[in-house]
């Protein structure tokens, strides 16, 4: 029998007693206790409704009835490992293959994005017989040791950069090395990767993979310029390496115009390996690696079996199929494009009014609003962003920040996020920014008077 629901403070006390302190809470000074969710809304223990603007895991909406039903029905019949034949596994692989370029036709199922990225790394090394990896600065690819090693976002605060890891600049045309006024930022950023490869070769090192999120998320909701991946892939393939596209944050129609974010680069770009996670199971632990026959055969050539106890089990695959069904039935990819365009339009209008908004960028329901202290230097408005996030929570809107300066408001809501939600969020941010500006003006006046 489950105990009666605890007071929020009692739950917090037990968490502090029993759960490792490295496991952080949102709004740690005043955490929210969430007990229920539906669609794009979450509810605390007092029944108060919060608009969820950041939960890209609940891709088709929290507790979607079709997904819940699929899990329940399959759980009543069978759940076992993939060493037995089962239609769900092959049906799901077939459905995923229909969304991808033809050459990405071999699938491996796992339980988390970290597992998927670790497997992709193993495959790349086995196929190329090389060791080294090129990643983008500020990247995060997962919590396993192998992935911390290729995640500058993490390793810079730990043991530092391994000799087999090479870090390329993020193709950020707003605050990166080559900005919007550069004559050819695509080539310039790609040449940075080329130079890294050449330097590695001079040291006798060989590149196994270029590993990148299709849209860098932790790096600040970055939209790489179209054509960048193609040029990078040319250099990477010439070096005998493979291109791994991490779609864990941004896949499954979120970008609106395409099902996969790497497709924003153009039809002539196809990665060698694609990893999937987070939204794939709408909250259920599910992940996938898709690759070519050639890479899969090289991975199998070791004679060492790849077996994942829970990966590809019938329940997980039933859930994955249900998520694809809902995306299709509810036209969520088109919905993401329509609502995302509307949200971007509203924020660009807000940018004219509030100078703290330096940049608005995104695709579909993957949007970043870059807050700055000054237009010339584009200094990250870190403290202001944190204050705004806290105030939004008090207005029952859940949002967070990303980027090296923790100053980019990140929007990755459930895909059922609608026009009314978008207008509510932007109107609230408008009001809060106006309040912040008035407070700053009053402080400036008081400071002037005192001197």
Image (spheres, grey):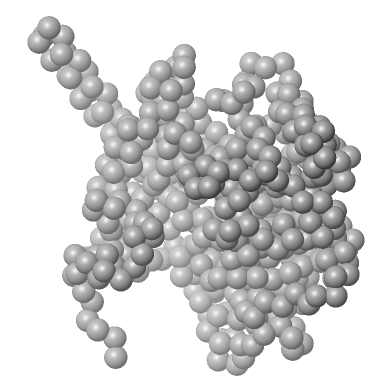
The location of residue 447, given as percent across then percent down, is 15, 13
Q: Identify the image quadrant of the C terminus.
A: top left
Instruction: State left or right for residue 424 relative to residue 141.
Output: left
Question: Which of the two residues, 280 or 406, is positioned nearer the viewer here?
Answer: 406
Q: Residue lying furthest left in this view?
A: 450
Q: Tally the marks.
A: 0
Vertical order, 16 against 125 (above or below): below
Q: Which quadrant of the view contains residue 47?
A: bottom left
Residue at 64% across, 22% down: 178
Vertical order, 353 against 120 (above or below): above
Residue at 74% across, 50% down: 244
Question: Which of the two residues, 16 or 317, is positioned nearer the viewer here?
Answer: 16
Residue at 85% across, 75% down: 303
Residue 345 appears in the figure: no
Q: Which quadrant of the view contains residue 427?
A: top left
The location of residue 75, given as percent across then percent down, is 56, 87
Q: Identify the image quadrant of the N terminus.
A: bottom left
Vertical order, 238 against 73 (above or below): above
Q: Residue lying furthest top in this view?
A: 451
Residue at 54% across, 58% down: 143
The location of residue 211, given as percent across then percent down, is 70, 47
Residue 123 appears in the figure: yes
Q: Which quadrant of the view contains residue 173?
A: top right
Instruction: State left or right for residue 94 relative to residue 218.
Output: right
The location of residue 205, given as percent across then percent down, is 80, 42
Vertical order, 432 against 256 (above or below): above
């Amino acid at each position: 029998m489950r105990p009666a629901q605890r007071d929020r403070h009692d739950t917090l006390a037990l968490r502090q007693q029993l759960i490792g302190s490295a496991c952080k809470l949102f709004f740690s000074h005043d955490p929210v206790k969430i007990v229920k969710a539906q669609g794009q809304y979450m509810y605390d223990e007092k029944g108060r409704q919060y608009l969820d603007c950041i939960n890209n895991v609940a891709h088709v909406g929290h507790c979607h009835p079709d997904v819940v039903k699929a899990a329940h029905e399959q759980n009543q019949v069978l759940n076992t490992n993939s060493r037995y034949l089962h239609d769900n596994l092959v049906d799901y692989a077939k459905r995923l293959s229909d969304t991808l370029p033809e050459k990405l036709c071999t699938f491996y199922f796992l339980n988390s994005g970290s597992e998927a990225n670790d497997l992709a790394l193993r495959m790349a090394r086995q196929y190329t017989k090389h060791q080294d990896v090129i990643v983008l600065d500020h990247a995060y690819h997962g919590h396993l040791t192998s992935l911390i090693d290729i995640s500058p976002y993490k390793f810079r605060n730990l043991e530092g950069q391994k000799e087999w890891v090479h870090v390329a600049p993020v193709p950020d045309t707003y605050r990166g090395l080559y900005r919007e006024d550069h004559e050819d930022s695509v080539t310039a950023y790609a040449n940075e990767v080329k130079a890294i490869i050449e330097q590695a070769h001079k040291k006798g090192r060989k590149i196994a993979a270029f590993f990148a999120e299709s849209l860098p998320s932790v790096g600040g909701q970055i939209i790489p310029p179209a054509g960048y991946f193609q040029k990078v892939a040319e250099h990477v393939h010439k070096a005998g390496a493979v291109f791994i596209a991490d779609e864990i944050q941004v896949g499954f129609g979120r970008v609106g115009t395409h099902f996969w974010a790497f497709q924003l680069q153009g039809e002539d770009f196809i990665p060698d390996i694609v990893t999937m996670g987070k939204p794939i199971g709408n909250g259920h632990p599910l992940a996938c690696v898709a690759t070519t026959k050639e890479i899969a055969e090289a991975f199998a050539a070791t004679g060492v079996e790849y077996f994942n106890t829970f990966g590809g089990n019938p329940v997980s695959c039933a859930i994955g199929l249900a998520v694809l069904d809902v995306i299709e039935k509810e036209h969520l990819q088109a919905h993401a494009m329509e609502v995302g365009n509307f949200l971007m339009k509203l924020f660009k209008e807000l940018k004219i009014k509030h100078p703290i908004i330096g940049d608005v960028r995104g695709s579909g329901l993957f949007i970043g609003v870059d807050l700055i202290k000054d237009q010339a230097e584009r200094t990250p408005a870190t403290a202001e962003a944190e204050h705004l996030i806290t105030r939004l929570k008090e207005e029952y809107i859940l949002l967070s920040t990303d980027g090296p300066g923790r100053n980019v408001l990140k929007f990755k809501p459930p895909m059922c996020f609608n026009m009314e939600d978008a207008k509510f969020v932007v109107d609230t941010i408008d009001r809060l920014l106006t309040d912040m500006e008035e407070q700053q003006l009053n402080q400036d006046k008081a400071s002037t008077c005192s001197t």
